[in-house]
Image: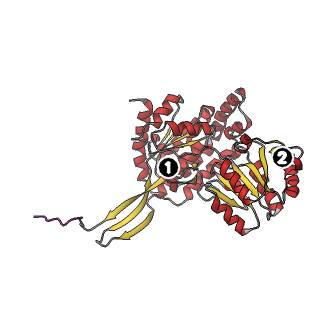
Amino acid sequence: MSDIKTQALACREASLTLAQLSSADKAALLEAMASALETQQDAILSANEQDLQAAREKDIGSAMLDRLMLNPERIAGIAAALREVAALPDPVGQVTRSDTRPNGIQVSKVRVPLGVIAMIYEARPNVTADAAALCIKAGNGVILRGGSEAIHSNTAIAQALQGALRQAGIPEAALTLVTDLRRQTMLELLQLSDIVDLAIPRGGEGLIRFVAEHARVPVIKHYKGVCHLFVDASADLDLALKLLIDGKVSRPSACNSLETLLVHQDIAPVFLPLAARALLARGVELRGDEATRRLVAEAKPASDEDYAAEFLDLILAVRVVPDLAEAIAHIRHYGSDHTEVIATGDEANATAFVAALRAAVVMVNASSRFSDGGELGLGAEIGISTTRLHSYGPMGLEALTVERFVVHGQGQTRVPIRVD
C-alpha cells in the first residue's frame, strides 16, 4: 500500500473520532489551536522566512510573495479566524427539515460531516490553519497538500495544530499534511474516491484545472476571479470611487479584487479622469479602450486578453459602455462567475444587474472585497465555488456538511408483515 493511501486511510479513521465530538469539545479544540499558533509564532515566522528567501531567489512575482508572506499581524489574524470559527454555530446535527408521514414515520434531514476533505493549494500558508479549522469544526478529517513554495511554513503551522490535537486526545491523522510534493503523489490522492469525499483546490487557474481534470473524487472548482465594477449613469461618484479604490488597491493579489472597470458613457467624461488620478497616484496601470484613452492619456491600449485577465496586480482594464445592457453583455462574455459589482442610484438597474448575472456573489454599492467567507458571516473561508454543485460562492461550515435522512418509526413496514 502506498504512503499516501496509508495516510488517507488514517485520516478517514481519525475523522470518525472528530464526527463524534460535541460542539463544546470542537470549540475548545479550535481555541487550543489558535493559542498554539500564537505560542509558536517565532518558529512559524522563522520557517516562513525560509520560504520567502527561496521564493526571492527564484524571482517569484510580488503577488505570490504577498500571498506567501507571514508576519505577527497575519498570524494574529489567522488565530483570530480560528477563534471566530470556534464561536460559530455548529452545523453538525442541525435538522433542516422534519415531517411526519401519513403512516406515522418521522422523517428528518440532518447535517452530518462529509468525511475526508483533500485541500490542494499553493502559496497561502494561512490556508493550512483555515482549512483545518473549518474541516474540524464540521467534523471532517482534512488532508492538506500545499505547494513547495510554502512547505516550511505549512509544516510549522501543521505541527502547532497537531500538538493541540494530541493534547485533546485526537489522532494527529485528523489533520494530515502531505510532505511528499511529487505530482504523482497528488495524482494518487485524487484517485482515492473510496476514501476522500471532496477535493478543494485553491490557487492559480492551472492548478485548479489540473485537479479537476485528473480527479476521480468530487472537486470544488474556482478557476479565477475576473471581477468587474460597473459604474452606472446614476451612481454617486464619490461612492463609486471608494468602491473602485478599495476593490483594486486594498489587496490586488486577492481573487476578489477588481480586474475590470466598466463606466457608463454618460458619466465617463467626469468619472474617468477622477478615477484615473486616484488610481495612478496609487501605482495602478490602466489599460483601456479607445473611449477610455481619449479621456485618460496615461491609459495603455487594452486587448481582449486584458479584459479576460485575472491580473492579481496593480493593473486595471477599463471600458466605456453605452448602457447597462452592454455592461451585462461584457461581463457575461469575459466574467468568471466570481463577483460582480454595480455602483448605481437606480434601484431598477440594480435589480436588473443582479437578475441578469449568474456570478456566485453580486454586490450593489458595496466593494468586491466583501466577497469573502469571513466578511459574509461564514467565519474563515475554505474556498470559493463558481460551479453549481452543493455549494456556490464562498464556502464555510455548512458547505463541509451534507444532509442525510434520519427516519424514526414504531415498526412501520412497506407491506404487511406477519410474524408467526
Q: Residue furthest left?
A: 420
Q: Residue furthest bottom?
A: 102
Mark 1, residue position = 136
- Horizontal side of 72 relative to 282 (left or right) equals left
Q: How many marks?
A: 2
Residue 414 in magenta stretch: yes
Q: Nearer the viewer, residue 202 or 275?
A: 275
Which amino acid, mark 1? Answer: Ile
- Of mark 1 and mark 2, the one earlier in the sequence is 1
Residue 352, position in %: x, y? 67, 64
Which stretch did the figure color magenta? 413-420
Residue 313, position in %: x, y? 75, 41
Which amino acid, mark 2? Answer: Glu
Numbered circle sitting on residue 386: none
Task: Tell me the quadrant of the picture where the C terminus can be found.
Answer: bottom left
Numbered circle sitting on residue 290: 2
Residue drawn at x 73%, y 42% as measured from the top left? 304
Please tell me in which quadrant of the rendered image residue 284 appears.
Answer: top right
Residue drawn at x 66%, y 52% as measured from the top left? 332
Q: Nearer the viewer, residue 260 or 372?
A: 260
Q: CA distance from mark 1 to mark 2?
A: 52 Å
- Horizontal side of 148 relative to 29 (left or right) equals right
Using a 10 Å C-alpha cutoff, classify the residue at mark 1 as few (fewer than 14 neighbours), some (14 to 19) or many (20 or more): many
Residue 70, position in %: x, y? 68, 40
Tag 2's secondary structure?
helix
Establish if 138 lies above or below 206: below
**Viewer-side label of 1, 2:** 2
